Image (spheres, rainbow, N blue to C red):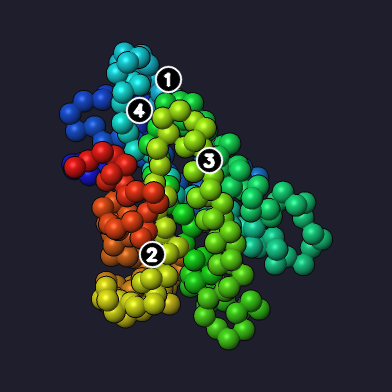
């Protein structure tokens, strides 16, 4: 995208003044294990609704440093990159596997989760001035080592957990429909849905095409310290860095496909076209 550096983390700014000048790359509100539903929130992550509130604080601050027209232009030309849903899906899967009494429908209902994505994230961001959304869907969560390396009953022959992947597919189908609907109802909203699920599966079908020799196991066992051991020496041949996250190589390949790749993995257009970059 031509940025000299990645956007700084919002919480690292420590309430310092945000200056929109040469070299400004934006702000990163993201958090590991962030959830859409605050009922699943914990002290170790920043939920999507709280990230939206942080962004609201940023907009309020910028209102005092640039003109209203300049702020509107800045926000309308910015890319709002969101990758969320996976943590909620893992929690829903755990609830479904729990021997406790059946939970209320809205705690495991994927359509309700998708609707919450729109109501708690996309709509509030649009109201604050966001117009261009790059949305990454959920990967095949049932293929992560955190799932496949644990005893479970949904994949008796080993390999990916089909029920967990079905949750991700249902969420992704709903997400595509949600963004299409919002683009019709919210003025000026443009979007691209990046198919991380499809890209992952395509790689798993032919890993050697991109130089992978292992798309099942984690390169890094545990937290990668003296107790658990060092990461594998051939990390560029692994898809998974740890039990739930990809290696840097896998992430870069996905990012390149979503940014300016063919339309196979982005709907209705890739991120580069969404940004109007030629």
Between marks 4 and 1, how big is the CA–CA gap?
13 Å
Q: Disc 2 vs disc 3: Cβ atoms closer than 8 Å?
A: no
Residue 15 percent location from the top left of the image: 38, 26
At 54% from the left and 55% from the top, the residue drawn is: 173
Mark 1 — residue?
Answer: 60
> To which residue does mark 2 refer?
199
Q: Report, in whole angstroms, how far the alpha carbon at label 3 lies from the one at label 4.
A: 21 Å
Residue drawn at x 43%, y 77% is: 216
Disc 4 element: helix
The quarter of the rendered structure image containing the N terminus is top left
The mark closer to the camera, 1 or 2, is 2
Disc 4 to disc 2, how far (Cα)?
29 Å
237 or 175, nearer to the observer: 175
For residue 169, side relative to residue 235 (left or right)? right
Number of the front mark, 3 or 1: 3
Give 66 or 210, whichever is nearer the viewer. 210
* SS label for mark 3: helix
Residue hosting label 3:
181
Give the secondary structure at mark 2: helix
Crowding near the residue tagged with mark 2, few <14, some 14–19, many ≥20 C-alpha atoms within 10 Å: some
The answer to whether the residue labelled 3 contacts the one labelled 1, judged by CB atoms less than 8 Å apart, is no
Q: Residue furthest bottom?
A: 157
Of callouts 3 and 4, which one flags the residue occurring earlier in the amino acid sequence?
4
């Amino acid at each position: 995208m031509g940025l000299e550096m990645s956007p700084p983390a919002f919480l690292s700014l420590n309430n310092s003044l945000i200056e929109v000048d040469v070299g400004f790359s934006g702000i990163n509100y993201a958090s590991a294990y962030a959830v859409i539903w605050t009922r699943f929130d914990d002290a170790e992550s920043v939920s999507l609704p709280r990230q939206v509130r942080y962004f609201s604080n940023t907009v309020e601050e910028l209102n005092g440093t640039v003109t209203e027209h300049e702020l509107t232009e800045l926000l309308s030309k910015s890319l709002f990159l969101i990758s969320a849903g996976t943590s909620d899906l893992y929690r829903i899967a755990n609830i479904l596997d729990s021997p406790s009494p059946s939970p209320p429908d809205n705690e495991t209902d994927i359509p309700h989760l998708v609707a919450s994505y729109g109501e708690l994230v996309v709509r509030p961001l649009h109201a604050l001035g966001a117009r261009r959304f790059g949305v990454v869907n959920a990967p095949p969560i049932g293929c992560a080592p955190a799932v496949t390396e644990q005893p479970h009953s949904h994949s008796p022959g080993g390999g990916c957990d089909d029920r967990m992947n079905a949750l991700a597919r249902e969420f992704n189908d709903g997400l595509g429909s949600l963004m299409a609907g919002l683009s019709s109802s919210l003025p000026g909203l443009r979007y691209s849905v990046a198919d991380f699920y499809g890209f992952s599966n395509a790689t798993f079908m032919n890993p050697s095409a991109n130089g992978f020799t292992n798309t099942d196991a984690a390169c890094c066992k545990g937290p990668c310290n003296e107790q658990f051991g060092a990461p594998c020496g051939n990390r560029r041949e692994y898809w998974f860095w740890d039990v739930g996250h990809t290696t840097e190589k896998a992430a870069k390949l996905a990012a390149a496909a979503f940014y300016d790749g063919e339309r196979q993995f982005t709907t209705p257009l890739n991120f580069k076209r969404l940004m109007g970059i030629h």
